Image: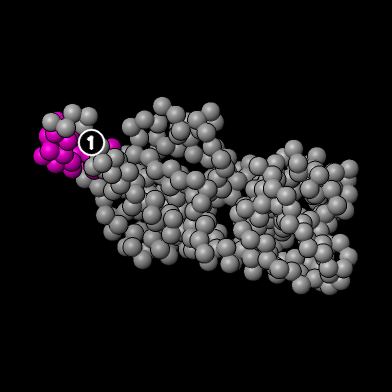
Amino acid sequence: MTTPPRETTDGIGFGGLHEAVNCPIPDFDLPGGHTLSVHDWTSQSDLAGHIKDATIILTTTIRLSADVLSPQVTPKLRLIVIMASGTDCVDKEAAKARGITVRNCPGTNVNSVSEHTVGLYFAVRRKFVDLHSIMVAVPEDIACDTEWKMKGGLNERLRTSDGEAPLLCGDETVGIVGYGTLGKRIKALARALGMHVLVAERKGMTPRPGRVSFEVALQSSTVLILCLPRTSRTINLISTLELQTMPRQAILINVARGEPAGGDISPLLNSDAAGLNLVLTPHLAWFAKKTLRNLQVATKATVEQWCTGDTINRVA
């Protein structure tokens, strides 16, 4: 759905901005004034019309392809600011070819995503979703007993795939794949919970000091956490061979770059996943009051400093 823009004008035109549905657009203090056009959401069919006069574009997830970044569609464009850490929504090579600066807002969601990661760990290790479903299931025939009453207990439901009782934090070995700001924060939280932590080197590379090889991380981790950007090197990083390498009681947590998914493109959302100890959340691990404030501060600083000739958080 596309909503009409909210426009304010002060002096010369300075840019067009969209996708305010994810985070409120901050107020900018720009030299010479600016024209601000805000769209809560923009469909691909309406995108060209919304940005044709823009010198600056703010976006979060809307795809800015090479066609969109062509001189015919965006003749005035000079700056793209991604109000997020991930940058895969922008064709950076096309932007670079035209001399369009691309910047992001790194580190703004680290606290919320790392806490979400810890929540996913407990939800999967303690099988909260499965146990909740059993608890609220009411037999159609009220005379029938629930599974809990019939079996006298549900501890079998909590066992791991090797038939053992679940591990506690102090028994876990956490492998972190992707050791940027988020990976470092997850490491600190995991250690605070008493977990042993391994930092994986990039796949196919000799481990640097303080890291283990990607293969050792797979073989040793009872909890493997992916916190990676979406790039050609990270797509399909974990598949059948890697899963077979991991211990049977291992948990895989993916807080890497996400995207809207449906049963037609994700096997985790169709019948193939039935019976798995699986917890799925939408792309909302970032969403928190502090994250929104961080994004506004980072976006405001990025735009204003670029207008004065300063460069921060440059991607391309």
Q: Is residue 115 depicted above or below 262 in this figure?
A: below
Residue located at (86% from left, 62% from top) = 13
Look at label 1 and name its amino acid. Val
Which contiguous range is marked in magenta? 144-164
Q: Please state, as top left, top right, bottom left or bottom right, where the N terminus lies in the image.
A: top right
Q: Which residue is mark 1?
A: 138
Residue 314 found in image quarter: bottom right
Residue 11 located left or right of residue 21 = right
Name the spot of residue 43 as percent of width and height, x first: 70, 41
Residue 151 vs residue 14, the one in the foreground: 14
Residue 17 found in image quarter: bottom right
Residue located at (76% from left, 72% from top) = 29
Name the spot of residue 124 as percent of width and height, x first: 34, 46
For label 1, count other residues whose C-alpha is less than 10 Å away and answer few (under 14), some (14-19) or many (20+): few
Residue located at (44% from left, 29% from top) = 270
Residue 95 located left or right of residue 255 = right
Q: Secondary structure at mark 1?
A: loop
> Is residue 147 found inside the magenta-colored segment of the image?
yes
Residue 306 visible somewhere in the drawing: yes
Name the spot of residue 83 as percent of width and height, x first: 65, 57
Q: Is residue 257 depicted above or below 11 in this figure?
A: above
